[in-house]
Amino acid sequence: MFHNVFGPVPSRRLGRSLGVNVVPLKYCNFNCIYCQLGRTKHVINDLRMFYPPEDIIRELEIAVRTRDYDYLTFIGDGEPTLYAGLGKLIQWARDNQDKPLAILTNGAKLIDENVRAWLSELDVVKVSTDAGSERTFRLINRPPHRDITFDKFIEGIERFREVFSGQIWTEVMLVHGVNDNEDEIERIGDALSRYRPDRVYMMVPTRPPAEPWVKPPTSDVLMNLARVLSRYVNSDRIFIIDYIERGGVSYR
Ligand code: SF4
């Protein structure tokens, strides 16, 4: 029985994903209104050694030999780049197995040079960009530390892009009445132009959110916003995950 390693689980984007959960519930540097894990209980922005890396490596040694997977994916029940042992795990995975490596992060710690160096060893880095302005950033992601500003957040991803040869995938979570308007999408488009993601996933909240008033935009609004965004990102890099009116997931 493993404590940190799980799966593989089927992932729409990563195939069979062998997961490594490196952060306990819910240590995060954001407090997103749509978070399916609820409100952030432990607001931190410094790195913590939540688990001895050797314990996780012991699980990985067994899992990579005995389980059939397409990606090894680092995640957290919070923000995985807040784990001080992450660099060691990534290096171990690079040296001891040959499947591609991914992380699902909000991207805010990419302003930290050490974190950029760790993540540059990965194949796919999934970040979030739900806002195109400081005001909307504070409304939707609600970073509790005042030193995490929108400009620094985008600057971190931009600096990472300069050194990273793998793929950056971006999730844009759209929330009715918060960021689902053309002006904000134009500003998000500007931000994406700065770091040039390889893919953009336009998402809507579907699981119970941290704040009960959070609602998705309609499919029509979503499709229109995708058209606006395609002025900034080539449309063949935009994927819409539309759960609303079709009763399922669709990619475009
Ligand atoms: S960054 Fe992720 S874990 Fe943190 S609050 Fe936002 S959705 Fe939740």
Image (cartoon, rainbow, N blue to C red):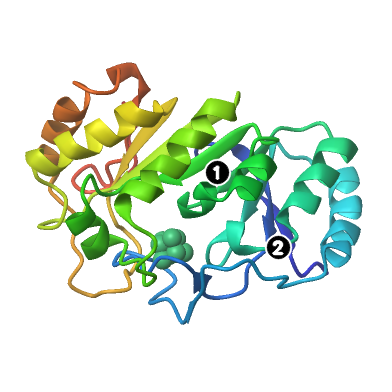
Query: Residue 251 placed where, x, y %?
Result: 34, 31
Q: Please tell me whether mark 1 sits on a helix, a strand or a loop.
A: strand
Query: Residue 152 placed where, x, y %?
Result: 38, 49
Instruction: Name the amino acid type tagged 1.
Output: Ser
Distance between mark 1 and mark 2 Cα atoms:
26 Å
User: What residue sits right under mark 1 in the picture?
Assistant: 11
| Residue at x 9%, y 57% (from the top left corner) | 177
Q: Quadrant of the N terminus?
A: bottom right
User: What residue sits right under mark 2 in the picture?
Assistant: 84
Q: Quadrant of the C terminus?
A: top left
Q: Is residue 51 left or right of residue 209?
A: right
Front one among 167 and 210? 167
Q: Name the N-terminal-most of marks 1 and 2.
A: 1
Q: Is residue 212 left or right of residue 8?
A: left
Instruction: Name the amino acid type tagged 2.
Output: Ala
Q: Is residue 147 above or below residue 220?
A: below
Q: Is residue 135 left or right of residue 33?
A: left
Q: Where is ligand 1, by quadrant?
A: bottom left
Crowding around mark 1 (Cα neighbors within 10 Å: few <14, some 14 to 19, many 20+) is: few
Q: Please tell me whether mark 2 sits on a helix, a strand or a loop.
A: loop
| Residue at x 76%, y 71% (from the top left corner) | 51
